[in-house]
Image (cartoon, rainbow, N blue to C red):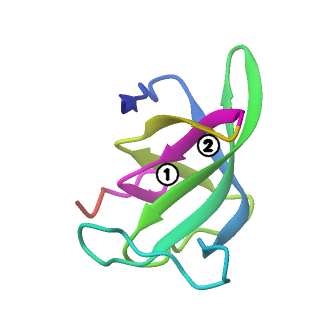
Amino acid sequence: MKLFIDVTGKSFMVTKEAVEKSDQNGRQKSERETGRPMWVTQVMALDETGGEMINITTAGERPTVTVGSQVALFKLEALPWATNGRNGVAFRAADIKPAGAPASK
């Protein structure tokens, strides 16, 4: 079940630049439907209640954002997961760009 997140009133700052999203064998994962390479960028999400570090997965070109820069997330979704008695939420965005830049999609 996908849950799109309203990012109104939230700001995002890069805390770790994009790295390849790897499988258990160390190979870069690809999107099943398109074959596009997947990337993970760590950001701090901040709103009036405080901040939280989250990892955002994107597919396609490696995001060109740098540590400390404010970014915009496009079509941010939360994907709840559960495996072997563990659970959590994964985050995925259609695009991640420097704040103020238009989405490429």
- Circle 1 crowding by C-alpha within 10 Å: few under 14, some 14–19, many from 20: some
In the shown orientation, is residue 43 left or right of residue 35?
Answer: right
Q: Position of residue 58 (x, y in %)?
A: 45, 61
Q: Which mark is residue 12?
A: 2
What is the residue that sits farthest to the top in this orientation? 49
Q: CA distance from mark 1 to mark 2?
A: 9 Å
Question: Residues in magenta?
Answer: 85-102
Say which quadrant the C terminus sits in. bottom left
Q: Which residue is mark 1?
A: 99
Q: Is residue 45 above or below residue 27?
A: above
Q: Main secondary structure of the magenta part?
A: strand
Q: Secondary structure at mark 1?
A: loop
Q: Residue at x 52, y 22 (%)?
A: 9
Which amino acid lies under the numbered mark 2 shown in the image of this protein? Answer: Phe
Q: Are marks 1 and 2 in contact (CB under 8 Å)?
A: yes
44 or 83, nearer to the observer: 83
